[in-house]
Amino acid sequence: MAYQALYRTWRPQKFSDMIGQEIVTKTLKNAIITGQITHAYLFNGPRGTGKTSAAKIFAKAINCLHPVDGEPDGTCEICQAADNGTLGDIVELDAASNNGVDEIREIREDVTYAPTQAKYKVYIIDEVHMLSTGAFNALLKTLEEPPANVIFILATTEPQKIPATIISRTQRFDFKRINAQSAYERMIYILDQRGNTYDEAALKVIANAADGGMRDALSILDQALSFGDGHVTLENALLVTGSVTQTLLGKYVEAVVNQNTKQGLAKLSEVLDEGKDANRFVEDLISYARDLLLYTEAPELVTLVPDETFTQLAKTQSANIWYNMIDTLNNTQQQLRFTNRPAIYLEVLTVKLSQPVGQGQVVSSVSSAVDPVATAVQTDRQSSEQQPTPSPASEPAQSVSHEEKRSQPVSEPKPVTSENSRVAPHVSEDQAAVFGVLSEATRGDLDRVTAIWGDMINMLPVPEQAMLNVARPIAASSNGLVVAFDFDVIRANAMRKPDLLQTMVTQIRELTQAQHERQLVFITTESWPVLRSKFVAQLPKHKQQAPAVNPDIEEKADTTEDNLVTEAKTIFDESIVEEIDD
């Protein structure tokens, strides 16, 4: 018999053979055990995660003559016929090549006939999103009310292309990406069963390169086995995947963070001379920077084994270095998609990453020469104690100087600098700025900003959208806006993004049709209740509390407290105001 690829030879034959999809397999097994089998299923997920395999196992299990705990026994005549592809009651259809109305009409005619061998007639339609509009319409009625012994299983990688009328008539199962550890363990099991030798480091490289797809992992493993004559080595895995060794990655990153441009370009030259793929190199750098970022907080999430260079980088560099590096790498990755000269982009990337702070490079544009901004923020903190609501005229001198360095007119400073100087990284020191907005806050202003918040986020690049997806406006006036972030790390990073701040203030002004831009104040969600309580406590006494000297005026006290609650709901978002009896 001709050689079969590993992903075909080792395709799961039972639910227990599938990895990384425990929720899906357990639900399907329980449905078979309890007899709660519905007429239509939708299997959605990335490529190579087991959608078609699960469909075949499910079709075999519901027709098995002797099922065991929801699993097919694999020995009865139905299971044997299904494995050999000779069971006519299990029909597989590739919608990519059979996407017309005629093919669906054939199915509509076939479903009227009873199964010939099995209990159920099962139709597995792969890549169902490729069906034409007419084909979907032809399938709709049959999918809604099929005969009792007919089951449809639809598999797709793009559920957003499927009409809602189809999805609503199915039970949807979302298959998730298979993590690198699970893929690594599965490859070890297969190689042990085959009797092949391997380097564990090589399998980890393959698992990371597969990007969540088990089929991709086995295809790469097949290539590595062929290249290495049955033995999987790290060198062969790197050659097949186009990846870069951890040692070379570490030396490259060490060179650029130490601002050694010459050494960084030399390491890049080594990568290019070995014929490594530019996109794969950038992906490896992103993964390496991500591992460095997580190493100090959650080492268990780091898949590579840290060497001396990695450990030294994690100890000596701040988290901001890795935030900024990932941002820059992501931008370069997008640019590589549209060029046939990737080497030039990688060389420019290396120079940008290794430039010292304050040189105006892409990496530093995110933190924007930390020293001048930090000085400007500190100056604003000191002045905020005397002026709760700072005005653009009171901009710190060093902030204006920073704008001059960026060749912008002194007479018309960009709002980006203004916003950077108004938000403080420590909430406790930014209390005056928050109070300045709250003193003039109205529910109408907050409603107007909340109404356009989603539209404003959609105008941003994807990385910046991710930042603001964990933030929300919580108080607004005609001159200011308080935004709460769920994570302090993201809040601090957002504060150092001039382009983001500029876009926010400009779009909020335009979308709300305001006369001028609002001052932005960034805080954390955790600190908001404390600041809110402090603000309420410093309100005038006739608004804050009821007289306590006369016990006979309880009703009046209740009325005053009700007024306080009403005023709080007017200033703040009503959904975050909670009334608690003392």
Image: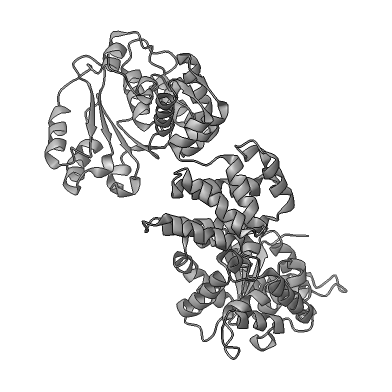
Residue 488 in percent (x, y) is at 67, 59
Q: In which quadrant is the C terminus drawn?
A: bottom right
Position of 161 relative to 391 (above/below): above
Residue 7 quadrant: top left
Q: How many marks?
A: 0
Image quadrant holding the N terminus, namely top left
Does the image show residue 441? no
Residue 339 visible at all: yes
- Up/down of 510 relative to 460, above or below: below
The x and y percentages for residue 481 are 60, 74
Nearest to the observer: residue 278 or residue 475: 278
Q: Residue furthest bottom?
A: 411
| Quadrant housing residue 338 | bottom left
Tell me: 564 left or right of 226: right
Q: Residue at x 62, y 40 (%)?
A: 302
Q: Is residue 260 left or right of residue 456?
A: right
As drawn, 1 above or below 245: above
Picture coordinates of residue 418, whole percent (x, y) = 63, 80
Would residue 383 appear left or right of 146 to someone viewing this image?
right
Q: Nearer the viewer, residue 425 or 320?
A: 320
Q: Residue at x 71, y 77 (%)?
A: 376
x%, y% of residue 25?
Answer: 44, 27
Q: Which residue is more in the foreground, 523 or 349?
A: 349
